[in-house]
Image: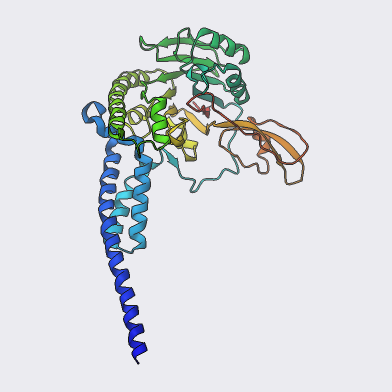
Amino acid sequence: MSEFYRTTYSSDARRKHRSVVGIIADVLFFVLTVAVVVLFVLTLFVPRLDPRVWGELTTLGIVAPFVYAAQALMTLYWIMRWRLWVAVPMILISLFGLFNVSTFYSMELRRTYAEPKYDRQAMKVMTYNVRSFIDDNGKRNIDSMAAMIRSINPDILCFQEFGFKDAMDTLLKNMNGLPKSLNRNNLSPAIYSRYPIINAERIDKQKNYLWADLVVRDDTIRVFNLHLHSTTIRKADKNYIENNEYIDDEESEEQLRSMLTRLTENNKLRASQVDTIKQIINASPYPVIVCADFNDTPVSFTYRKMSRRLRDTYREQGRGYAHSYRGFYDMLRIDYILCSKEFEVLSYEVIDSWGWETQRTRQGDTIVVRRYGNQRQLIGEGVRERLDSATLAAAEGDSVLINNEVTFSDHYPVMARLLYTK
């Protein structure tokens, strides 16, 4: 009998102990949840906040993916704890952020990639901040970059931080005679095109943005190449974040304050630039393609204003997490290809690797398929004939992937295939 009472008492004690631990955990998570919800709600409003008015608050867009992830984790916690009085409001609040999620993470629900759409009349548009063709070792690396670009074979090519005249002439020699824009200045953007360029103009005195009119199938389109004001984030700042130096650094607060101040001031400068540029884009008499290094994330005043009434090629055809900046754990998308409604977006890629992939068919034959970027299109029946961007050839041996990581610049090239439907 005494053994029975000891067992019952012990069981009750453990149950009471678990209950106390659960209550403490709920209290701690509730406090954390309140903080996360406040950040989440503020992040929702960031794209609507003019940096010239709201200042430092607008820098929240940089950490938006982390805030969204924290919101999802907190919501999941309360669902698992079956605390509906918290879980239900968390779910409702999270629903307001679904639209913004698609700017940096594209859900693959209800999508199929087994039958990609190809059209030989589609144009390959590529934008690339080449950092004056200087690699991580401080050396000019024009030939390697040109080889990578030739493998992609774009029809319209927009460069930012293009560099000097010799860089242009060297690249022109390797680009199969692509016509050039009127570029002769250091760090100025440039536009190349297989289509005739009938007019071009620089928009500002600093020569950071220009447009060119191209003739495409007896019609005219206008291509904008934009390079907005830099974030002025230096290599030391990237190392500071990526190497977790802020954890033990006694001067951490001063370093972070310096970064925050620079980000805030540059947000304000870009807001002023966008006011001018957007008016010019809206006044275009022709359908437009905008290739740009915004130096700003999709959760920003800059992106929201610039993308209004335009299609974001990533949101149309991208998949997975979006990034175009090589640094900060590849978490930032700051390079964009936007287009007006006259264009159908067929594909989108961030090209962070390129090479040759050999692949075995269902019949056991081995073929060589030229691949680039993250995209791995599935080759199904009847699709191979339409892969006009791939090269097929006989090969021997086992399946091998030669994957050369793109490290020529601190940006990755971004490419989209557009079909002019007017």
Instruction: Tell me if 270 is positioned left or right of 357 in this view.
Output: left
Q: Quadrant of residue 45?
A: top left
Q: How was the colour assigned to the protein in this rendering?
A: rainbow
Q: Quadrant of the N terminus?
A: bottom left
Instruction: Tell me if 295 is positioned left or right of 36 in this view.
Output: right
Instruction: Tell me if 319 is positioned left or right of 388 in this view.
Output: left
Q: Nearer the viewer, residue 292 or 19?
A: 19
Task: State the residue at coordinates (29%, 50%).
Answer: 93
- Res. 235 in view: yes
Report x, y in % for residue 190.
48, 14
Q: Nearer the viewer, residue 142 or 344?
A: 142
Specify the farthest residue to the left: 53
Q: Quadrant of residue 60?
A: top left
Report x, y in % for residue 82.
33, 64
Q: Is residue 209 above or below residue 248?
A: above
Report x, y in % for residue 420.
51, 26
- Res. 310 in view: no
Report x, y in % for residue 13.
31, 76
Q: Is residue 4 above or below residue 142?
A: below
Q: Is residue 91 above or below residue 407?
A: below
Count the labels in the image.
Answer: 0
